[in-house]
Image (cartoon, rainbow, N blue to C red):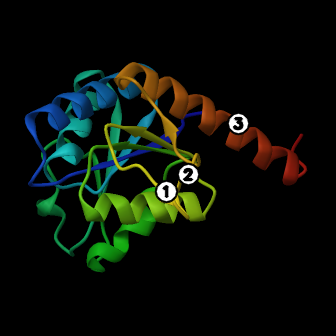
């Protein structure tokens, strides 16, 4: 079964380090046969898509606007939503797990939506979350791109198995 993994992070303001990490994440996902889902634009989204494509993988871009030509050059399937930042919910719900690479406030909102919907989030040099002054352990931290991908694929597989059990498919 092909797993879809969402990769989220900074757009136009992505740092060279964020670009490097995201491209490695995308490449690892592509090598392992996962489909990469992003917001379809620049920065981390483009870098993850580029890495996936270079490794022979498939990519989906969930776009904020209504013009498929807004997608970066590495998106195989552009999905036009016309709903702006509200698309963040669609980006995270389209993956069986989410890898957050660095990120601005849009990334933080995506992390919150994913965690609120019990979608596993793997953090790579991204936001940390605290609740009532205590670090929240909901996000799985990764030390590097390979670790992030391994943790995301494992979490996605566990999520699929749990869905199969609750759906009576097992």
Q: Which residue is mark 1?
A: 130
Mark pair 3, 2: CA separation: 21 Å
Answer whether residue 33 is visible to the viewer in this image: no
Name the side, left or right, on which 57 lies relative to 10.
Answer: right
**Sequence-wise first label, 3 or 1:** 1
Above or below, 24 relative to 99 = above
Examine the image and state in which quarter residue 27 appears: top left
Which label is found at residue 94? none
Above or below, 114 relative to 143 = below
Q: Position of residue 112 (x, y in %)?
A: 47, 63
Which of these two is toward me, 103 or 57? 103
Examine the image and state in which quarter residue 22 appears: top left
Q: Position of residue 11 (x, y in %)?
A: 16, 54
**Crowd tier of the residue under label 3, counting other residues whose Cα lies within 10 Å: few below 14, some 14–19, many 20 or above:** some
Query: Please, what secondary structure does the residue beneath circle 2 have?
Result: loop
Name the side, left or right, on which 51 lies relative to 73.
Answer: right
**Quick one: quadrant of the N terminus?**
top right
Which residue corresponds to the image point at 10% horizontal and 41% vertical from the top-left? 15
Examine the image and state in which quarter residue 41 appears: bottom left
Q: Position of residue 161 (x, y in %)?
A: 76, 39
Which residue corresponds to the image point at 89% horizontal and 39% vertical from the top-left? 170
Which residue corresponds to the image point at 24% horizontal and 54% vertical from the top-left? 40
Mark pair 3, 1: CA separation: 25 Å
Which label is found at residue 136? 2
From the image, state whether disc 3 or disc 1 is nearer to you: 1
Mark pair 2, 1: CA separation: 5 Å
**Crowd tier of the residue under label 2, counting other residues whose Cα lies within 10 Å: few below 14, some 14–19, many 20 or above:** few
Q: Which residue is mark 3?
A: 158
Count of numbered tags? 3
From the image, state whether disc 3 or disc 2 is nearer to you: 2
Answer whether residue 88 is visible to the viewer in this image: yes
Query: Please, what secondary structure does the residue beneath circle 3 have?
Result: helix
């Amino acid at each position: 079964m092909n797993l879809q993994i969402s990769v989220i992070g900074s757009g136009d303001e992505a740092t060279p380090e964020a670009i490097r990490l995201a491209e490695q994440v995308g490449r690892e996902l592509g090598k392992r046969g996962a489909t990469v889902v992003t917001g379809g634009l620049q920065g981390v989204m483009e870098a993850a898509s580029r890495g996936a494509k270079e490794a022979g993988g498939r990519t989906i871009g969930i776009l904020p606007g209504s013009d498929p030509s807004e997608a970066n050059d590495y998106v195989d399937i552009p999905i036009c939503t016309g709903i702006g930042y509200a698309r963040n919910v669609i980006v995270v719900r389209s993956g069986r797990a989410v890898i957050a690479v660095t990120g601005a406030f849009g990334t933080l909102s995506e992390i919150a939506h994913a965690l609120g919907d019990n979608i596993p989030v793997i953090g790579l040099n991204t936001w940390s979350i605290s609740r009532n002054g205590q670090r929240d352990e909901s996000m799985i931290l990764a030390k590097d791109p390979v670790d992030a991908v391994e943790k995301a694929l494992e979490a996605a597989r566990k999520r699929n198995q749990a869905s199969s059990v609750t759906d009576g498919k097992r």
